[in-house]
Image: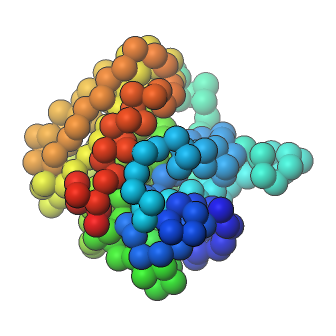
Amino acid sequence: MQERKFGDLTVRLAGGTDREGGGDGPLCVLMHGFGAPGTDLVPLFRALTVPREVRFAFPAAPLVLDANAPAEHAPRAWWLIDMLRLQSSIRDEPEKLARQTPAGLDAARGAVEGMLDAFERELGVPRERVVLGGFSQGAMLACDVALRATRPPAGLVLMSGAPICLEDWQNLAPERKGLRVLQSHGRADPILPFHGAEWLRDFLRGAGLSVEWIPFSGGHGIPDGVLDRLSAFLKPSDGTG
C-alpha cells in the first residue's frame, strides 16, 4: 500500500498488480464515514475477493475533528455534523433532513472531483472505469458526486447511507438511468434509519438506476454478506473493466 496526494486529498492506494495501486486495472474508490480516520476502510481491500488487477483508493476526508489525535487515527469528516441535531431531525422531521443541503457539501464534492481528475491524469483511469462509493457520510457524498458529475462512474456503492439534497437529486437522477448501484443497510441502524435507505432505494430505482439492494439484520456497519456482494460487483465482467 502507498500513500499519495491526489488533488487536495490524501489517498491510500492498494491492490493492483503490485498491491500498491499499480497496473492498469479498474479502480474502486471508497470514502469513510463521519468521525472515522482516513484508514478506516483500508482493510476492506484484503477482505474482498476480486481479480488481482482491481485497484483501490481510500481517500481521507479533509476535516480533522481532533487535532490532538495521532494523524493516522484522527477522526475526520467530509463536512461537519451536529450529531444531536441530526438524531433529533431524523426522529421528528426525517423528510426535512433529506431536503437539506449540508453546509460544506460543495467543498467536499469539489475535493472529490479534483481527486478523480487526478486519478485520470496520474493513474490513467477514466471515470468510466471507476466504481465510486462509501460508508455513511461517505456514501452520501459518493451519491451526490455520481449524480452531479459530467461523466458518471462505472458503478456506485452506497453502504449505510441516507438521502440528502432531495430536490437536486430528483432532478439529476434520471440522467443516470442504467447506472449500476450496490446499496446496503442494517435494519437496526441507530444512526441513519432503515426507512430512509428504503426510500433512497425506491427513488433511485424509480429514476431508472439499476439498484442491487442488500438489507441485513444489524446496525451501522458492513457485514460479511455485504462484502461478498461487493466482491461480485467489482469484477470487471460486471462493468468496471
Where residue 170 appears, as percent x and y from the top left, is: 20, 48
Question: Is 77 drawn above or below residue 118 in the view shown?
Answer: above
Between 66 and 158, the one nearer to me in the picture: 158
Question: Is 13 drawn above or below residue 99 in the view shown?
Answer: below
Q: Is residue 14 left or right of residue 100?
A: right
Residue at 14% x, 40% y: name it: 205
Between 173 and 73, the one nearer to me in the picture: 73
Where residue 45 appears, as percent x and y from the top left, is: 53, 49
Q: Is residue 178 left or right of residue 118?
A: left
Residue at 66% x, 51% y: name it: 38
Residue 172: quadrant of the picture: bottom left
**The N terminus, quarter of image:** bottom right
Q: How is the image coloured?
A: rainbow
Residue 82 at least partly seen: yes
Between 136 and 41, the one nearer to me in the picture: 41
Q: Is residue 12 left or right of residue 233?
A: right
Residue 226: quadrant of the picture: top left
Where residue 122 appears, as percent x and y from the top left, is: 51, 83
Where residue 101 appears, as percent x and y from the top left, is: 41, 48
Residue 171 at least partly seen: no
Most distant residue in the bottom direction: 121
Question: Is 89 drawn above or below residue 228 in the view shown?
Answer: above
Residue at 16% x, 46% y: name it: 210
Most distant residue in the right direction: 68
Question: Is 64 drawn above or below residue 15 in the view shown?
Answer: above
Between 114 and 53, the one nearer to me in the picture: 53
Residue at 39% x, 28% y: name it: 225
**The C terminus, quarter of image:** bottom left
